[in-house]
């Protein structure tokens, strides 16, 4: 591959003139947008421009209580009594309406979160619709999902999601809960609440019975109130390992079921016999997709010694071509970092990487003067013990190590507290099976990376969490089996 023939791309910005974002959003409780009990709001900011997009309700324990009560009433009086085939129809309707409003949702996702429009348009939003379609199909087939057993819903699910895939994470949570007959209170992340609120509009417009889905915006304290509320039966959390541990402690000794989808530090392994050009694309996708704000990002690269120089040279050449900038431009490869706090965290960890002796490389790409940006970055000369090899950076930063044998790379890949995902690149099917079965991670991709499908379970081992989302496995945490 030759990357030195410089293509010049004309700007190709997505038009936003048809987008409606209200100045202020309340919580979505019992089928209506309602003002927060304490009357407080906070700003949600466009990270590419540092401008305020809207103000959203700052949820408190009182708001959470109202939402949980609405969810309980809806569960007792409506949703748990409704024939499953009718429940399925509502979920299909949500899926179709997401498709109808796909362009609007993609633009708002990119405005609020900073991710390139190409990704929100082609990945986040279609996958969110696909999750609703998939679980709509299961609603009246639970007897087939769990043969010989009777699946009953749990009741009210409290769900908390992070900022990296806001609409998609809402879909991962809400769709299986509803299909199994539960009602929901969802708390989106503080920096990216807007697509969840647009989803609330869709849910309202679908005539879903009031209270079946409630959305309370706010900070971590609102999430904690939800976890600790005695009226919920299940907690579904996606976020950092630190907060996951707090939640697990809070739930110990209660009867609440829980699933925790936490952080990761995946090994992406390139063997000498791999198709190197494809592997280079896979490395780029593995670490720079969504600015590296991806729990399953291939942030630790292991390259077999014989091809290491070649792979690193090709990787650097390819990095020179990446376009960093306006998330709404269809040519953009890497958008804005989601928040100032996250940018500071990335900068601090990169500084530690340099101080620990790592060799840093960044391309010369231009970055806008306003907004939160970080150039795609790679490190060589790092050790297993380096902080940037051990800790999740959650940004566009790749740490590269080499290896000689299969046994060595398996040992190194597993030398992490996490166990969410991994990648293997080789020409040999037998090596794929050998290595992927020995990597302790919930998902291992072979000769590809970051492929998601609603039918396929996703989740971690060790400090990456417990329980699975997606597929049939994703229904199980929302039912009790008789
Ligand atoms: P956080 O854990 O900081 O936040 C996740 C959510 O929990 C947010 O809504 C947050 O609110 C809320 N929260 C914060 N404190 C508490 C608390 N004490 N009790 C209850 N809820 C709380 O994670 P980030 O948002 O920073 O997300 C990034 C992390 O998520 C990464 O570690 C990433 O790996 C992980 N992740 C895991 C995935 C998986 O499937 N395994 C998928 C995607 C991300 P607020 O926004 O106000 O802080």
Image: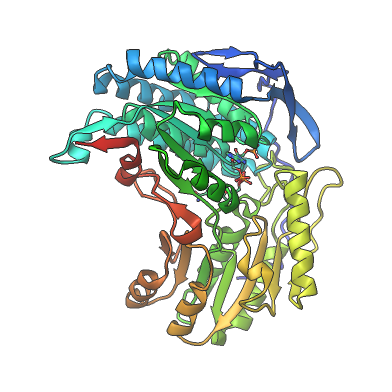
Horizontal and vertical percent for residue 43?
Answer: 75, 28
Horizontal and vertical percent for residue 189?
Answer: 62, 36
At x 66%, y 59%, the residue is 393
Q: For the view shown, which residue lies furthest in the right direction?
A: 369
| Side of 159 where 85 appears, left or right | left
Taking 90 as reference, is 466 above or below it?
A: below
Closest to the observer, 380 or 389: 389
* The N terminus sits in image quarter: bottom right
Residue 2: image quadrant is: bottom right
Horizontal and vertical percent for residue 98?
Answer: 48, 27
At x 43%, y 45%, the residue is 259
Q: For the view shown, which residue lies furthest in the left direction?
A: 148
Can residue 212 be seen here? The reply is yes
Can residue 450 be seen here? The reply is no
Closest to the observer, 409 or 104: 409
User: Where's ligand 1: which quadrant?
Assistant: top right
Say how the picture is coloured.
Answer: rainbow
Q: For the view shown, which residue lies furthest in the front direction?
A: 253
Taking 25 as reference, is 388 above or below it?
A: below
* The C terminus sits in image quarter: top left
Closest to the observer, 115 or 44: 44
| Side of 5 where 464 appears, left or right | left
Horizontal and vertical percent for residue 318?
Answer: 66, 66
At x 49%, y 47%, the residue is 248
At x 57%, y 71%, the residue is 301
Taking 255 as reference, is 230 above or below it?
A: above
């Amino acid at each position: 591959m030759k990357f030195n023939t410089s293509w010049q791309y004309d700007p190709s910005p997505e038009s936003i003139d048809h987008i409606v974002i209200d100045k202020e959003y309340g919580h979505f409780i019992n089928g209506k947008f309602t003002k927060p009990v304490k009357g407080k709001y906070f700003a949600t900011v466009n990270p590419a421009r540092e401008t305020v997009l809207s103000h959203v309700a700052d949820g408190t324990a009182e708001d959470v209580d109202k939402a949980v009560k609405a969810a309980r009433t809806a569960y007792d009086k409506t949703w748990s009594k409704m024939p499953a085939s009718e429940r399925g129809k509502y979920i299909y309707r949500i899926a179709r309406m997401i498709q109808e409003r796909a362009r609007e949702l993609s633009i708002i996702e990119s405005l609020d979160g900073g991710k390139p429009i190409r990704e929100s348009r082609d990945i986040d939003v279609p996958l969110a619709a696909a999750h609703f379609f998939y679980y709509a199909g299961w609603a009246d087939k639970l007897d087939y999902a769990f043969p010989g057993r009777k699946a009953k819903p749990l009741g009210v699910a409290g769900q908390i999601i992070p900022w990296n895939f806001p609409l998609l994470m809402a879909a991962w949570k809400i769709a299986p809960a509803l299909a199994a007959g539960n009602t929901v209170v969802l708390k989106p992340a503080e920096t990216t609440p807007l697509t969840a609120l647009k989803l609330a509009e869709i849910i309202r417009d679908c005539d879903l019975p009031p209270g079946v889905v409630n959305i309370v915006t706010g900070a971590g304290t609102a999430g904690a109130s939800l976890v600790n509320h005695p009226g919920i039966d299940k907690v579904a959390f996606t976020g950092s390992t630190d907060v996951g541990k707090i939640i697990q402690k809070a739930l110990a000794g209660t009867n609440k079921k829980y699933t925790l989808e936490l952080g990761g530090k995946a090994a992406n392994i390139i063997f000498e016999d791999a198709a190197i050009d494809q592997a280079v694309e896979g490395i780029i996708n593995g670490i720079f997709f969504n600015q590296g704000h991806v729990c399953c990002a291939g942030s630790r690269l292991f390259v077999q010694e014989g091809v290491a120089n070649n792979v690193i040279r090709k990787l650097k050449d390819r990095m020179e071509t990446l376009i960093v900038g306006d998330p709404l431009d269809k040519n953009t490869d890497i958008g804005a970092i989601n928040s100032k706090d996250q940018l500071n965290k990335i900068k601090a960890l990169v500084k530690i990487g340099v101080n620990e002796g790592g060799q840093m490389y960044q391309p010369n790409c231009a970055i806008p003067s306003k907004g939160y940006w970080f150039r795609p970055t790679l490190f060589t000369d790092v050790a297993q013990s380096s902080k940037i090899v051990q800790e999740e950076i959650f940004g566009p930063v790749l740490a590269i190590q080499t290896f000689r044998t299969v046994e060595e790379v398996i040992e190194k890949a597993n030398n992490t507290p996490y166990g969410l995902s991994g990648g293997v690149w080789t020409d040999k099917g037998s090596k794929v099976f050998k290595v992927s079965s020995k990597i302790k991670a919930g998902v291992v991709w072979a000769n590809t990376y970051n492929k998601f499908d609603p039918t396929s379970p996703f989740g971690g081992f060790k400090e990456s969490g417990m329980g699975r989302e997606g597929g049939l496995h994703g229904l199980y945490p929302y039912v009790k089996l008789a």
